[in-house]
Amino acid sequence: MKVVSAGLTDVGRKRNHNEDSFLIDDELQLYVVADGMGGHAGGGTASRIAVETIDKELRRAREGRDNPFVTTSNLQDALLPDALRTAVERACLAIFTTAQEDPRLSGMGTTVISLVVRDNQAFFAHVGDSRAYLVRGPLIQQISEDHSLVNEQIKAGMITPEEAKHSRYKNIITRSVGFEEEVQVDVMGVVAEPGDVFLLCSDGLANMVEDRELHEAVQASATLADVPKRLIDLANERGGDDNITVIVVQVSA
């Protein structure tokens, strides 16, 4: 399948620096959003190390004996999920090691939502509360599951999704890349169809815009390149409480 992509990041209205990083590597068909945490130096450093390491590790894997980018007939036989997981794990170690070497970076970490498209297969690796969505025709579906305190509370029946939107704990995540030496990485795979749009974003967008509005922006935009700015403008109109990063990836036959 052919892939078209667009991405944009914005500092938002309340922050004075941007700790988000994103990667668009159309050659590998690799896309990553990372939302850093740990202060002015730490957050930006962690997210930058994450996207650079994931890209480097997957390029290295492609040159190895067991190239994970070799096409497989079904999701179950694909090598890319393990390669993607390993790349995020190595990003975790790289961030942790860097923080140990520089006290100013102590405690830094980052979320990661990453996507690799290979033919009609799409694979995701995920840590934290940055999100991946699939827009298919009239439907939108969140593919990733937030690693956050409020999501744990929702699953336990302690609060409703509506209450979670206004919770003072909504920015507390339960997993991050680099805060500790190792991290558990969720990996998912889907079979893509022509016309599918995958949307990756940091919580600076997800906390300000409803799923249906994400869908509307994808459907209403004249070109895919218009989608990130349209969504960032909407999040900023509602206060722009955090850094905002969006990548959209559309597949076609």
Image (spheres, rainbow, N blue to C red):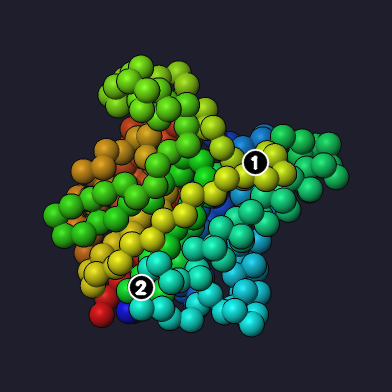
Q: Amino acid at mark 1?
A: Gly
- Seen at 66% across and 61% down, the residue is 53
- Pick whichever of labels 1 and 2 is earlier in the sequence: 2
For residue 50, what is the image quadrant?
bottom right
Q: Quadrant of the N terminus?
A: bottom left
Q: Which mark is residue 74?
A: 2
Task: State left or right for residue 35 relative to residue 72.
Answer: right
Q: Residues within 10 Å of mark 1 (few under 14, many from 20)?
A: many
Position of residue 58 relative to residue 219, above or below, is below
Q: Is residue 112 visible?
A: yes
Q: Which mark is residue 109?
A: 1
Task: State left or right for residue 105 relative to residue 79.
Answer: right
Q: Amino acid at mark 2?
A: Asn
Question: What's the distance in space between the residues labelled 1 and 2, CA to CA?
Answer: 34 Å
Q: Position of residue 15 (x, y in %)?
A: 54, 34
Task: State left or right for residue 81 relative to residue 56.
Answer: left
Closest to the observer, 117 or 227: 117
